Image (cartoon, grey):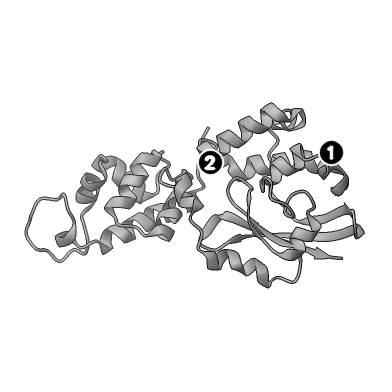
């Protein structure tokens, strides 16, 4: 079910679309018949509707901020016709409360090395997770802390470590509550990507191999990924207490940088 969008959000969407329509150069737009020159900037609404494959009435309502529901495919046509850049396209879909169909798995997998290298500069255990919560990079402090996950050559997926690696139960304090919360946070985090083949394969694999994950996943609890206290029973360093802080990386919304600040 799609909930009605607030009036301010609808107005912002309409103003955003209108401003980009007015910036378009009619002489450079493909798909419109030739016409006489005029003083009006950009395209007329009728021309923009034609480019986007929408009725003039529907397009007019969009610019007026009315509470209409546009499909993701229609928004994608608009973004393409208006030649929106990545940030503007993401803003369009955010305002419309829709998921961009062009946000593919392959696009999410491309990460510049310099983005990942920032982890090495952090003087605390730190790691970067991708959309599937698989570690893409971590520093030596994280490698030392996360025995059985980041210190070997096995699977780097955080969920597989928590639910399939026996040592996780002794490393992570309050294991049962933390494991249940992790599943709820993961569901919230990947909700826009449940049709992603990589996400689907991961969930199916965990459902088959872990009764605990299967039970928590079926509860359908959704919680935001939050920081807070994290405690561990390290085999060498003993009891460790940290404050977890997580950030989304600018320009790479599918990547999460997590740091553990010792208390």
> Is residue 124 placed above or below 173 in the rendered structure?
below
Q: Is residue 241 above or below residue 55?
A: below
| Quadrant location of the C terminus in the rendered image | bottom right
Residue appearing at x 62%, y 56% in the figure: 256
Find disc 2 in the rendering and name its residue.
193
User: Residue 180, how many percent across, how many down?
Assistant: 77, 38
Quadrant housing residue 117: bottom right
Mark number displayed over residue 234 = none
Q: Earlier in the sequence, mark 2 or mark 1?
A: 1
Residue 218 visible from this viewpoint: no
Compared with 12, 52 (above or below) is above
| Residue located at (31% from left, 45% from top) | 77
Per the model, the C-alpha gap separating discs 2 and 1 is: 26 Å
Residue furthest front in the image: 153
For the residues bearing labels 2 and 1, Cβ distance under 8 angstroms: no
Asked whether, in this view, residue 237 is left or right of residue 89, the answer is right
Horizontal and vertical percent position of residue 248:
60, 59
Residue 220: x, y in percent? 68, 32
Q: Name the residue rendered at 69%, 32% in the picture.
A: 217
**Residue holding disc 1:** 176
Percent position (x, y) of residue 140?
Answer: 73, 64
Secondary structure found at label 2: helix
User: Closest to the observer: 64 or 154?
Assistant: 154
Q: Alpha-carbon neighbours of circle 2 within 10 Å: few (<14), some, or many (≥20)?
A: some
Where on the picture, by quarter, is residue 242?
Answer: bottom right
- Could you say whether the residue bearing mark 1 is in a helix, strand or loop? helix
Observer able to see residue 206: yes
Is residue 182 shown left or right of residue 34?
right
Residue at x 15%, y 66% (from the top left corner): 39
């Amino acid at each position: 079910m799609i909930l009605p969008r607030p009036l301010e959000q609808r107005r912002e969407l309409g103003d955003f679309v209108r401003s980009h329509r007015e910036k378009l150069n009619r002489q450079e737009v493909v798909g419109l018949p030739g016409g006489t020159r005029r003083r009006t900037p950009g395209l007329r609404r009728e021309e923009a509707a034609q480019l986007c494959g929408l009725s003039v009435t529907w397009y007019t309502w969009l610019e007026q901020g009315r509470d209409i529901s546009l499909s993701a495919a229609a928004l994608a046509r608009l973004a393409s016709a208006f030649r929106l850049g990545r940030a503007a396209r993401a803003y369009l879909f955010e305002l419309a409360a829709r998921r961009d169909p062009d946000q593919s798995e392959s696009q999410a997998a491309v990460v510049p090395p310099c983005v990942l290298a920032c982890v090495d500069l952090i003087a605390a255990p730190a790691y970067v997770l991708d959309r599937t919560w698989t570690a893409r990079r971590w520093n030596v402090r994280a490698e030392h802390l996360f025995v059985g996950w980041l210190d070997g050559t096995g699977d780097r997926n955080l969920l597989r470590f928590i639910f399939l690696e026996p040592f996780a139960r002794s490393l992570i304090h309050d294991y049962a509550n933390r494991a249940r919360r992790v599943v709820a946070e993961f569901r919230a985090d990947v909700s826009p990507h449940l049709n992603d083949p990589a996400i689907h394969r991961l969930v199916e694999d965990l459902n088959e191999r872990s009764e605990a994950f299967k039970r928590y996943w079926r509860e359908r609890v959704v919680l935001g990924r939050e920081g807070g206290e994290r405690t561990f029973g390290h085999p060498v360093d003993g009891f460790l207490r940290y404050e977890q802080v997580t950030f989304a990386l600018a320009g790479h919304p599918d990547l999460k940088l997590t740091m553990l600040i010792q208390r």
